[in-house]
């Protein structure tokens, strides 16, 4: 299975017309070894799922799930190329601020992180997972 390297979460809050929205940007590198690259040439395809989590809660309560991403492009091995391939993963999703309200009191800061899960479309489901860093939304 590929691995997930350098996961990161950034949050940008914007208000328009009295509605406050938060755009979450999740970035990472999905690392494929030579065998996985060869399997990609044979037709295996991977994609990512992203869950938005309330990091305040015990057990990281899921606040929202980002729709599935497009397949992660994996370049097949080419003579002279490195054995591993680092496919960039960028997921951008906007939700109302209220969706990320993990703390019961209004005005409490909310600690948010995401879980990135990668699996292969056309093979038995086996996940590789990794958490992003945690970000705090004020108020």
Image (spheres, rainbow, N blue to C red):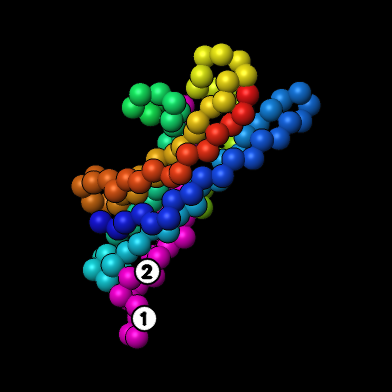
Q: Are marks 2 and 1 in contact (CB under 8 Å)?
A: yes
Q: Is residue 117 left or right of residue 95?
A: left
The residue labelled by disc 1 is 81
Instruction: Relative to 136, say whether 88 is above or below.
Output: below
Q: Is residue 65 magenta?
A: yes
Mark 2: few/some/many CA within 10 Å (<14, 14-19, 20+): many
Q: Is residue 11 magenta?
A: no
Q: Is residue 39 left or right of residue 62?
A: left
Query: Residue placed at 38% from the left, 56% from the top?
Result: 5
Q: Which mark is residue 48?
A: none
- Alpha carbon of mark 2 to alpha carbon of mark 1: how far? 9 Å
Query: Residue placed at 32% from the left, 45% from the top?
Result: 129
The secondary structure that dominates the magenta segment is loop
Instruction: Relative to 28, say whether 54 is above or below.
Output: above
In front of the other: 133 or 31: 133
Query: Residue placed at 56% from the left, 13% from the top?
Result: 105
Task: Pick the quarter of the image with the C terminus.
Answer: top right
Secondary structure beneath dot 2 equals strand
Query: Residue placed at 39% from the left, 43% from the top?
Result: 131
The image shows residue 113 at horizontal and vertical percentages of 46, 37
Task: Pick the quarter of the image with the N terminus.
Answer: bottom left
In front of the other: 54 or 66: 54
Q: Which residues are magenta?
A: 62-89
Looking at the image, can residue 34 be seen?
A: yes
Looking at the image, can residue 38 be seen?
A: no
Mark 1: few/some/many CA within 10 Å (<14, 14-19, 20+): few
The residue labelled by disc 2 is 85
């Amino acid at each position: 299975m590929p691995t997930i390297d350098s996961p990161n979460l950034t949050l940008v809050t914007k208000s328009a017309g009295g509605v406050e929205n938060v755009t979450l940007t999740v970035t990472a590198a999905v690392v494929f070894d030579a065998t996985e690259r060869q399997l990609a040439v044979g037709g295996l395809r991977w994609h990512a799922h992203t869950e938005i989590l309330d990091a305040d809660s015990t057990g990281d309560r899921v606040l929202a799930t980002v729709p599935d991403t497009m397949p992660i492009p994996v370049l097949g091995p080419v003579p002279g190329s490195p054995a591993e391939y680092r496919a960039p993963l960028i997921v951008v999703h906007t939700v109302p601020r209220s969706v990320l309200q993990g703390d019961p009191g209004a005005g409490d800061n909310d600690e948010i992180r995401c879980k990135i899960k990668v699996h292969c479309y056309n093979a038995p489901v086996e996940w590789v997972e990794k958490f992003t860093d945690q970000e705090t939304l004020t108020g």
